[in-house]
Amino acid sequence: MRLIAYVQGTNGRLNTKAWDVFCSFTPQIELVTDAAAFIDLSGCGSLPSLLRQIDQNIYGEHSIGIATTKLLAKAAVLAPKAIIPFSVNLTKVLRLHKLKPCAHLFANKEQVFLANLPIEYLNLGPSLQEQLNKLGLFRVADVLSITQQQLIYRLGTDGTLVYQSARGIDHSKVEPNYPPCSIVIEKSLDHVFNQGALSMVLMDCCTSLSNELRQTGKAATLCRLALTTDDGQKLATERKLSSPSNELLKLWFLAQSMLNTLTISTPLTSLKLTAIEPVPVSLQQLSLFERPTTICQGLNKILSNLRYRFADTKTYLASQIQLDRYEQMLSFYRHE
């Protein structure tokens, strides 16, 4: 049987240390917000033993709802008073101090628990929820009184989703996204102190990072530069890119700006450049620019067509196009 937990910080936020504790017991963690996550506890051994260990190592207080699906686990946390008759209070039974409230919903009481809740707890989205309200359906019990065929007739294909959700049926899996994916490039240094030599090593790291990002189809959003001195001192700084990118020059300028913020007084033994949480790269982006620049020869025909198409309307158009692997340059077009 699946065991899904929904964890939420009681103060509205959680730090990474809290997620690191959960991650040490199960790798199946799906962060929903900075303060909440779904955790798959299936196959993690004895639930009481697991919760006691987490309670001993966690920082701060956390609300936890445990059920067989993500939908029910989240509802168990968001409706703490409604779930009391249909669950066991593990905080009291196991004498937990930081995991409170910690409610485990009885499997045979899931539908009864949901029936007492407003339809907001079904996570159907504002548009679908509004349609249900127009039909006079405000609570889950109202939805349970209607057949699947009637819901499909009124809502189309969404009718099946509403029918299943009202009965606690949720086949969605926990999609692990913690710890965040990172690409790390690290270089060992032979007591480098010369600024020129350090810049060359940094350029080499940026080149490797750029290649790695391109091969994985990702673009960096946040980079971290960490240096280690020969006396064991750690120097580190982070900085965001103005927009996601895997271009060598942008990574180089960012890395160089980070390096300039660090005060280096002794030779270095290692340098680490990290792209934190890279995102899928967009092959084509549209934006507006104020000034025209040189037109890439390979795009002359495309831009000629654009001139013809927008000549009468005087529309300002700019395309940032990623060319083939060489990516020689960007082309911007403005017609006045």
Image: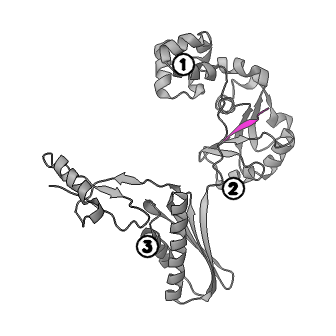
* First in residue order: circle 1 vs circle 2: 2
Amino acid tagged 1: Gly
Instruction: Give the SS element for disc 2.
Output: helix
* First in residue order: circle 3 vs circle 1: 1
Q: Mark 3 points at which residue?
A: 253
In magenta stretch: residue 23: no
Q: Tell me the CA gap for discs 2 and 3.
A: 31 Å
Q: Which labelled disc corresponds to residue 17?
A: 2
Residue 26 appearing in the image: yes
Q: Viewer-proximal residue, 210 or 9?
A: 210
Please indicate whether residue 18 sits to the left or right of residue 315 in the image: right
Residue 95 appearing in the image: no
Amino acid tagged 2: Lys
Quarter of the image where the C terminus is located: bottom left
Q: Mark 1 points at which residue?
A: 159
Please indicate whether residue 107 sits to the left or right of residue 201 in the image: right
Amino acid tagged 3: Phe
Judged from this view, the residue extending furthest toward the left is: 312
Q: Residues within 10 Å of mark 3 (few under 14, many from 20)?
A: some
Q: Viewer-proximal residue, 75 or 62?
A: 75
Start-end of magenta stretch: 1-11
Quarter of the image where the N terminus is located: top right
Q: Which labelled disc corresponds to residue 87?
A: none
Instruction: Give the SS element for disc 1.
Output: helix
Q: Which-is-in-front pick, marks 3 and 1?
A: 1
